[in-house]
Every structure is written in structure tokens, then in C-alpha cells.
Amino acid sequence: MQNVICYIGLGSNQLDPKQQLLNAIKAIQSLSDSKFVAQSSFYQSSPLVDKKEHSQSMEETAADYFNAVVKIETGLLPFELLRQLQQIEQQQGRVREPNNRWAPRTLDLDILLYADTVIQTQQLIIPHYAMRQRDFVLKPLLEIAPEVIFQEGVHASHLLQQCDNNNLRKLAGTPKIL
Ligand code: A4P
Ligand code: MG
């Protein structure tokens, strides 16, 4: 198995988000051909909603998200990794609403980085298309990957300074499942 370093973003804002993240981490630890390396703290933030689709009131009433990032070493190829992560989402009751972008979800697993691989297909975009603009991704990522630099030579900490503020706060006492 040729191992590749990969970062996965976790998000949940439904049905006990903290427990959803803990369950997802356990499931990621059981991925085939993979080794679990590190886990960030858990972070809470206001929901980023699609302003084109949701009214202001939706933004105000939708539940806060819990987010985290984990690092794995994997021999799974990107599309196989995506398939297995989507299986974990399904196991945790993820319901996709085709006409409701960014609807509340029990669990969202995004492949953020897969070594320095760049993929631009309809099914899979790596690096994740929006990670550079999101504090709830970059902050936990930097915790476990302080030196991470994007293809274009930009450091993640530099991007973090330019992100919109989603009222991000780190949760004290995040349990580590190692
Ligand atoms: N896909 C493409 N690239 C990837 C990738 N790198 N990793 C495709 C995972 N999937 C990828 O995703 C839609 C399709 O994206 C998948 O079928 C896969 O083939 P989805 O999980 O079904 O839908 P989604 O997550 O609603 O769509 P999207 O646009 O990926 O949303 P995001 O970017 O995941 O954002 N606010 C806070 N505070 N915290 C959050 O975590 N998350 C979202 C969702 C909105 N607001 C949030 C948060
Ligand atoms: Mg997603």
C-alpha cells in the first residue's frame, strides 16, 4: 500500500452534533487500508447558508455547526475514499435534499487535501473547493497541520486571516479517540 497523507473535514448540525463527530471519527479509524494519524479539537460556528436559497431568518434559526479536521494516511485512491466516506455519512443518517443546498445535516465528510493531488471533476474536487474561504475548516486544519501550504504557495494561516467570521469558537475538552 502506497500511503498518502489526507485531511478530512467533518461537519454536523443535527441530532447531537458532538456525538455525530465522535461516531464519525470512530468510523474513519476503521477505514480499510488507512491509518488514523491526528484529530483536531472540535469547533462550533454559526451556520454558513446559501444566501441565494435561504432567507435571513433561516440563517438565524439554523442550528450551529460542530466542525473538526482529521489526518489519515491512506492507500485508498481518492474516489474509493470518497465512496467510503459517503457510506459513513449514510450510516449516520445523512439525508441529501437535492433542492436545498447546504441543508442541515447529521454528518458531512469532505476530502480537504489528498497529498498534493489536484482533482477537478464533477464528482470530486480536491483541494475542497471552498476550504480556503472557511475559518471552520482552516482553524482546525492548522491545529494538526501547522505548515500546510497550498499549491499556489499560500500558507493556510494567511488565508485564515482573510476569512469571514462565522463566530468560530473552540470547544474545551474535546475527547480524543486514539
Ligand atoms: N464532492 C466534490 N468534491 C468533494 C470533496 N473534496 N469531498 C462532491 C467530498 N465530496 C466532494 O456533496 C455534494 C457532492 O460534492 C458529493 O456528492 C461529492 O461527489 P454533499 O456532501 O452531498 O453536499 P453538500 O455538503 O451540501 O455540498 P457542498 O457544496 O460540498 O457543501 P459544503 O461545502 O460541504 O458545505 N456552516 C458551518 N458553520 N460549518 C459547516 O461545516 N457546511 C456546509 C456545507 C454549509 N455551511 C456550513 C458548513
Ligand atoms: Mg459535503
Image (tube, rainbow, N blue to C red):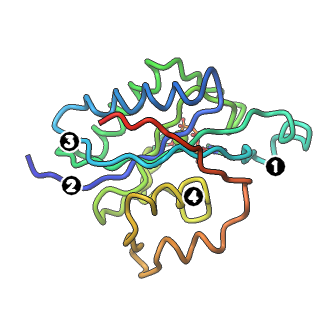
Q: Residue 72, how many percent across, how many down?
A: 28, 47
**Residue type, label 3:** Lys
Q: Badge 3 is on which residue? A: 35
Q: Tell me the mark number nearer the camera, choosing from 3 and 4.
A: 3
Which residue is rendered at x = 30% and y = 62% of the image? 117
Q: Tell me the mark number nearer the camera, choosing from 2 and 1.
A: 2
Task: Kindly indicate the quadrant of the structure image that contains residue 118.
Answer: bottom left
Q: Distance between the residues labelled 3 and 4?
A: 26 Å
Which residue is rendered at x = 55% and y = 65% of the image? 132
**Residue type, label 4:** Ala
Q: Tell me the mark number nearer the camera, choosing from 3 and 2.
A: 3
Q: Badge 4 is on which residue? A: 130
Around disc 2, counting alpha carbons within 10 Å, would you say few (fewer than 14), some (14 to 19), or many (20 or more)? some
Classify mark 1: helix, strand or loop.
loop
Q: Residue 4 carries which label?
A: 2
**Residue type, label 2:** Val
